Structures are given as structure tokens and as C-alpha cells.
Amino acid sequence: MKTFISMISAITLATAIGCSKHEEEGTAEKAGKQVDETIEKVETYTSEKMHEAGEAVEHAGEEMQK
């Protein structure tokens, strides 16, 4: 019976330690965050440039109507 309790205790302790180790980011998580940040920057930049292009087209249209 003592062996069984010792085994259960060891498994419980190992599980608790194993579950608590996930606080640190691994290489894949870091790379994923960098990809996400880069995509956000590209989306912002593209959105700004599309807005500028739209304004330029509107301005050109107004100039053509004169």
C-alpha cells in the first residue's frame, strides 16, 4: 500500500511540475509573435497607402472635371 501511495504521490508531483513549466515561451511561440507583429505592421502600412492612393485618385478625378 505504501508503494501505491508513493507512486501516486510521485505522479501527482511530476504532473504539477510539468504543468507549471509552460510559462516560458519556446522558439515557435516567439516566432509566431514576430510573425503576428509583422503582419499587423504590413496591414497598417498597406491600409495607409491604400487610403493615400484613394485620395490621389479622387483628386485626379476632380482635376479632370475642371
Image (cartoon, rainbow, N blue to C red):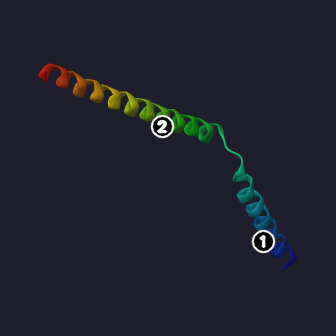
Question: Sequence-wise, which precedes: disc 2 or disc 1?
Answer: 1
Image height of 52 relative to 18, above or below: above
Q: Are marks 2 and 1 in contact (CB under 8 Å)?
A: no
Question: The residue tagged with tag 2: helix, strand or loop?
Answer: helix
Where residue 32 sits, quadrant-wise, is: top right
Where residue 47 sits, quadrant-wise, is: top left
Residue named by callout 1? 8
Q: Position of residue 38 (x, y in %)?
A: 51, 32
Q: Position of residue 33 (x, y in %)?
A: 57, 39
Q: Nearer the viewer, residue 56 or 22?
A: 56
Q: How many marks?
A: 2
What residue occupies the far left of the structure in this picture?
65
Residue named by callout 2? 40
Quadrant of the image for the N terminus? bottom right
Q: Position of residue 16 (x, y in %)?
A: 75, 63
Q: CA distance from mark 2 to mark 1?
A: 47 Å
Q: Residue at x 74, y 53 (%)?
A: 21
Question: The residue tagged with tag 1: helix, strand or loop?
Answer: helix
Q: Residue at x 12, y 23 (%)?
A: 65
Image height of 61 relative to 29, above or below: above
Q: Residues within 10 Å of mark 2 (few under 14, many from 20)?
A: few
Whether residue 12 sits left or right of residue 2 in the image: it is left
Q: Residues within 10 Å of mark 1 (few under 14, many from 20)?
A: few
Whether residue 33 sits left or right of residue 47 in the image: it is right
Image height of 34 relative to 60, above or below: below
Quadrant of the image for the C terminus? top left
What residue occupies the far right of the structure in this picture?
2
The type of residue carrying mark 2 is Glu
Q: Nearer the viewer, residue 37 or 26?
A: 37
